[in-house]
Image (cartoon, rainbow, N blue to C red):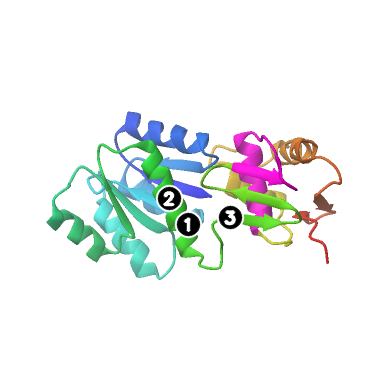
């Protein structure tokens, strides 16, 4: 999952980003409206966390443009404005959810997971394929009933692969969806992470390499 944090308070933005990374959720930060709109134009995000009071185009304007585009991420507004009238305005602008400051990081993560699932109604709460059971909410993985301990990055990569239901995911797409904007496009991090993930999952090998194309979960025919 890829999240855009639109927040002009550096400490809060970085705290949210780091908290999401602990949950295997990749996140980028935009500190004003112009930066947010630029990021949205070049990256496909699943969720946008938007503070309404930011420099440049306001958070309301950013949300309005996302909705007007007819596509784009789900919108979760993060704001200190906690009056019912403020919330009503936010929802009228097209917000999918609303969370007032201060908030618990765990609640934010749960709301993000719920929004992501709601956007793709075909996606079940628990992802299953080839004997794997992946629970994004609890960040737990089981293979044939055996609990598999994964690092955050390994979990993020596995979630993308299992969600593809046997489809091939390129290294470039994995880098975009499981890392953040600071990832080096020429890095071999994807190959290294997939290799370590295979070892953690054990035999028989579940992740196949499709030469010149990418990776996929070997789903029995």
Region of the chain picked out in magenta, as a range: 140-163
Sequence-wise, the earlier of marks 3 and 1 is: 1
Tell me which residue sits at (38%, 37%) in the image.
Answer: 105
Question: Looking at the image, which residue is at 46% across and 48% down?
Answer: 3
Are the residues tagged 2 and 1 within 8 Å (C-beta)? Answer: yes
On screen, residue 134 above or below 196: below
- In this rendering, the answer to whether 173 lies above or below 121 is above
Graded by Cα atoms within 10 Å as few (under 14), some (14 to 19) or many (20 or more), the crowding at tag 2 reads: many
Residue 71 lies in magenta, yes or no?
Answer: no
What residue do we see at 78% from left, 38% from top?
195
Location of mark 1 (residue): 116
- The disc placed on residue 112 is 2
131 vs 73, left or right, is right
Q: Residues within 10 Å of mark 3 (few under 14, many from 20)?
A: some
List the residue tagged with mark 3: 126
Q: Is residue 147 magenta?
A: yes
Give the image location of residue 110, x and y in percent: 42, 47
Residues under labels 2 and 1: Cα distance? 6 Å
- Left or right of residue 108, residue 148 in this image: right
Which numbered disc covers residue 183? none
Please tell me which of labels 3 and 2 falls first in the chain: 2
Q: Is residue 187 visible?
A: no
Q: Quadrant of the C terminus?
A: bottom right
Disc 1 secondary structure class: helix
């Amino acid at each position: 999952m890829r999240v855009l944090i639109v927040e002009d308070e550096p400490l809060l933005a970085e705290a949210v980003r780091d908290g999401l990374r602990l949950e295997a959720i990749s996140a980028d930060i935009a500190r004003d409206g112009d930066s947010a709109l630029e990021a949205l134009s070049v990256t496909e995000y699943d969720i946008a966390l938007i503070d309404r009071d930011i420099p440049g185009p306001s958070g309301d304007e950013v949300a309005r443009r996302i909705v007007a585009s007819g596509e784009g991420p789900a919108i979760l507004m993060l704001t200190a404005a906690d009056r019912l009238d403020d919330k009503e305005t936010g929802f009228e602008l097209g917000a999918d959810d609303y969370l007032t400051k201060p908030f618990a990081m765990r609640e934010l993560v749960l709301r993000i997971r719920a929004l992501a699932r709601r956007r793709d109604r075909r996606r079940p709460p628990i992802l299953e394929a080839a004997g794997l059971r992946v629970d994004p909410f609890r960040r737990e993985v089981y293979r044939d009933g055996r609990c598999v301990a994964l690092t955050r990055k390994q979990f993020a990569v596995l979630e993308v692969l299992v969600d593809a239901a046997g489809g091939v995911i390129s290294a470039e797409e994995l880098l975009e969806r499981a890392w953040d904007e600071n990832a080096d496009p020429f890095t071999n991090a994807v190959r290294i992470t997939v290799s370590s993930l295979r070892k953690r999952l054990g035999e028989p090998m579940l992740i196949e390499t499709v030469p010149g194309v990418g990776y996929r979960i070997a789903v029995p025919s």
